[in-house]
């Protein structure tokens, strides 16, 4: 009796071998590439490198903090993204290293050692007799393959001749090119991203800077030397000034990058479309080496046309205000004296007349193009105005430059700030020329504009005098008396005291001067038209509200007109004419007065004159990985085209003496391809007819 052989267990693989198999597998590389694509989508949808306040306004405090911890605001420099990218490079490199020897060996092999019996297993196969002897058939077939671009190798055997041919070997080269392109692009991206800056900071002990102040005051531990191998920074240069330091923005602050040269901006040039959008902009600059090597170099930087100097590319990124000089006229909204102010864009100054608030001049915009066209569909109500596409509403486009505007912020002692945006010149809206004064509580909101009508001199004096008169109790009393005297019917003098009391109450409510138990503080009282509306809702029965509202508005308009006449008398001006222009002025004034009573600033700042100074924002980059990325792009194009449009085909022709025809040959053909496509059958049919002389036999 013999012992039965026991089955042996398969040898166990080590953990290192399994890890290698995982990293070198194509599935792992594709999974990493999918994750990177998803992360890139997130980086496209979520704006990158925005102030944290913008994200809080958009997502809320909880999600904004969570997304910040996940690095979604700096996706392309987040540690997890760089780690995935590094693993993709490693995995793809291992795939290339693993398959390159096989591909190279396959390129050298014609597989001429195949057995003739195996040719019958191919999908594309044929067999037939030819009149030529095997040696002559070999010569004939060799010429045929050469003419058709096939490379082949001949193997003579005892029982026949094997011709092994191949075509389209570049298909395998495409595989190597495409995968090598992924590695090169990823490595180039790593070199040109924040990784190089982070490594230099770690090696040199540098720290991000999170404070403010002048560039020259930043300490050396927050600066990188000009020899940094790779960086991408922004340089802000006003006209007539020079700069030699760039700013690199990181999630935890900024790092200053010193340049080996300084950039002086001689002139900034910008052209605009009719819509007011920038058409093109360019900067005339002078480059000076700081180490004394080389002369001054003059150049012009345009969008998409960078200037390369000492291996650093200078791109025209954007433009901004470079510190334009503004002259402002501060007009009191209530009591007080007007005064003049001067400042530059970007300046901060504490102004006592503004309630000890800090004035921050934020910007100057010289061109403001607005569509002043009227809506053709506004004259009649259509169903299409409420349903369907918004494009159905037709509008006349009348683009006009309404002149300069400037923006500023008033910041209180607690650090809270409101932002204002005022136009320098009056704008004609709905047939009435008005000054626009905008205000918003935060950058996440849009500006809400106060429309103040101009007087016959095209100034704000008429409106502001009327507003001051409204807020003066003595003038309100005189205006109420005048209106009551004029509004009392003849012979009904007994009605004058009642009309006077009503007029006083209407003007007091409108001015916010009537005490209210619901709002004991004068600051919290309703005023303007909302105050009248609130009074009617609280004091008048619902059935009589419409009629009472009409009466109160008539009294308000009449008494305000008397206020307007008194204000003009005080200013030494003649009484206003009772014409359409005055009526339009008063109509707009009622609305503007109601809104202006909620204006939070004691003074309205008007732009008197300005001297514009523009600045260019350059992006300076030393990109050692740029050439790798370009090479990777070329290889990717070559690889994709090679894999998609080049078909690898292998052909075997087996020649033996024919048993059916003396002096003839028996020929067996077989065709193999990496991908079976309809054109493979056509190629094989053409070869079969040429080799077996089927066309000659048909004739």
Image: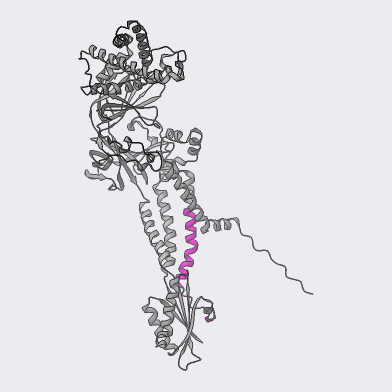
Specify the principal SS of the magenta part.
helix
**Residue for point 32% across, 16% down:** 334
Q: Report which quarter residue 424 is drawn in.
A: top left
**In the orientation shown, which residue stands out farthest toward the bottom?**
662
Above or below, comparing residue 414 to residue 630 in the picture: above
Quarter in which the N terminus is drawn = bottom right
* Residue 696 location (% of width, % of height): 40, 87
**In the orientation shown, which residue stands out farthest toward the front?**
491
Q: Report which quarter residue 319 is drawn in.
A: top left
* Residue 698 location (% of width, % of height): 41, 87
* Residue 655 location (% of width, % of height): 47, 85
Residue in the foreground of this view, choosing between 309 and 617: 617
Left or right placement of residue 466 versus residue 87 in this view: left
* Image color mode: one colour
**In the orientation shown, which residue stands out farthest toward the right?**
1
* Residue 272 location (% of width, % of height): 25, 41
Q: Is residue 256 magenta?
A: no
- Which stretch appears magenta? 88-116
Quarter in which the C terminus is drawn = bottom left
Residue in the foreground of this view, choosing between 17 and 490: 490
Left or right placement of residue 286 versus residue 61 in this view: left
The reply to whether residue 342 is visible in this rendering is no
The reply to whether residue 17 is visible in this rendering is yes
Above or below, comparing residue 444 to residue 521 in the picture: below
Q: Is residue 100 magenta?
A: yes
Left or right placement of residue 106 versus residue 352 in this view: right
Above or below, comparing residue 541 to residue 252 in the picture: above
């Amino acid at each position: 009796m013999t012992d039965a052989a026991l089955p042996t267990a398969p040898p166990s693989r080590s953990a290192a071998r399994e890890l290698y198999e995982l990293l070198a597998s194509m599935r792992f590389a594709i999974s990493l590439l999918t994750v990177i694509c998803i992360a890139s989508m997130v980086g496209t949808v979520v704006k990158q490198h925005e102030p944290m306040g913008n994200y809080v306004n958009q997502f809320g405090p909880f999600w904004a903090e969570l997304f910040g911890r996940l690095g979604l605001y700096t996706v392309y420099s987040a540690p997890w993204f760089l780690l995935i990218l590094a693993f993709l490079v490693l995995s793809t490199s291992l795939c290339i290293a693993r398959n390159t020897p096989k591909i190279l060996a396959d390129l050298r092999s014609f597989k001429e050692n195949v057995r003739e019996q195996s040719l019958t297993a191919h999908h594309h196969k044929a067999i037939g007799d030819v009149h030529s002897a095997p040696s002559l058939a070999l010569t004939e077939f060799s010429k045929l393959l050469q003419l058709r671009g096939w490379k082949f190798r001949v193997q003579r055997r005892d029982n026949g001749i094997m011709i092994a041919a191949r075509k389209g070997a570049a298909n395998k080269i495409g595989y190597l090119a495409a995968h090598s392109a992924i590695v090169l692009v990823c490595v180039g991206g790593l070199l040109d991203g924040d990784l190089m800056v982070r490594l230099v900071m770690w090696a040199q002990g540098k720290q991000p800077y999170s404070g403010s102040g002048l560039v020259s005051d930043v300490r050396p531990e927050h600066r990188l030397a000009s020899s940094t191998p790779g960086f991408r920074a922004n340089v802000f240069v006003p006209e007539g000034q020079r700069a030699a330091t760039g700013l690199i923005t990181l999630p935890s602050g900024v790092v200053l990058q010193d340049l080996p040269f300084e950039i002086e901006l001689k002139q900034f040039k910008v052209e605009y479309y009719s819509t007011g959008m920038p058409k093109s902009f360019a900067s005339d600059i002078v480059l000076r080496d700081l180490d004394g090597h080389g002369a001054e170099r003059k150049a012009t930087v345009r969008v998409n046309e960078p200037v390369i100097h000492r291996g650093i590319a200078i791109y025209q990124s954007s433009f901004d205000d470079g510190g334009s000089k503004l002259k402002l006229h501060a007009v009191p909204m209530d009591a007080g004296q007007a005064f003049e102010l001067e400042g530059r864009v970007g300046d901060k100054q504490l102004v006592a007349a503004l309630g000890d608030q800090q004035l921050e001049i934020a910007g100057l915009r010289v061109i403001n193009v607005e569509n002043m066209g009227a809506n053709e569909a506004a004259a009649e109500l259509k169903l299409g105005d409420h349903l369907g596409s918004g494009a159905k509403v037709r509008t006349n486009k009348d683009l006009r430059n309404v002149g300069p505007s400037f923006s500023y912020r008033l910041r209180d002692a607690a650090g809270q700030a409101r932002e204002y945006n005022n136009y320098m010149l009056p704008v004609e809206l709905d047939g009435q020329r008005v000054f626009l004064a905008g205000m918003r509580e935060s950058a996440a909101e849009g500006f809400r504009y106060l429309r103040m009508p101009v007087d016959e001199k095209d100034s704000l004096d008429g409106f502001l005098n009327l507003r001051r008169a409204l807020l003066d109790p003595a003038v309100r009393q005189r205006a109420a008396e005048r209106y009551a005297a004029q509004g009392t019917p003849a012979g009904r003098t007994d009605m004058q005291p009642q009309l006077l009391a009503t007029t006083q109450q209407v003007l007091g409510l409108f001015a916010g001067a009537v005490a209210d138990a619901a709002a004991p503080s004068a600051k919290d009282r309703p005023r303007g038209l909302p105050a009248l509306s609130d009074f009617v809702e609280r004091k008048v029965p619902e059935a009589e509200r419409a009629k009472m509202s009409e009466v109160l508005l008539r009294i308000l308009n009449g008494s305000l007109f008397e206020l307007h006449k008194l204000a003009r008398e005080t200013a030494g001006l003649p009484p206003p004419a009772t014409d359409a222009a005055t009526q339009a002025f008063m109509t707009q004034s009622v609305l503007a007065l109601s809104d202006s009573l909620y204006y939070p600033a004691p003074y309205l700042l008007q732009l008197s004159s300005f001297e514009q100074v523009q600045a260019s924002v350059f992006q300076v980059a030393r990109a050692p990985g740029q050439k790798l990325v370009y090479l990777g792009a070329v290889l990717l194009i070559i690889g994709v085209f090679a894999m998609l449009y080049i078909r690898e085909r292998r052909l075997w022709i087996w020649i033996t003496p024919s048993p059916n025809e003396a002096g003839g040959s028996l020929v067996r053909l077989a065709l193999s391809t990496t991908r079976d496509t309809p054109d493979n059958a056509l190629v094989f049919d053409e070869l079969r007819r040429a080799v077996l002389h089927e066309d000659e036999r048909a004739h």
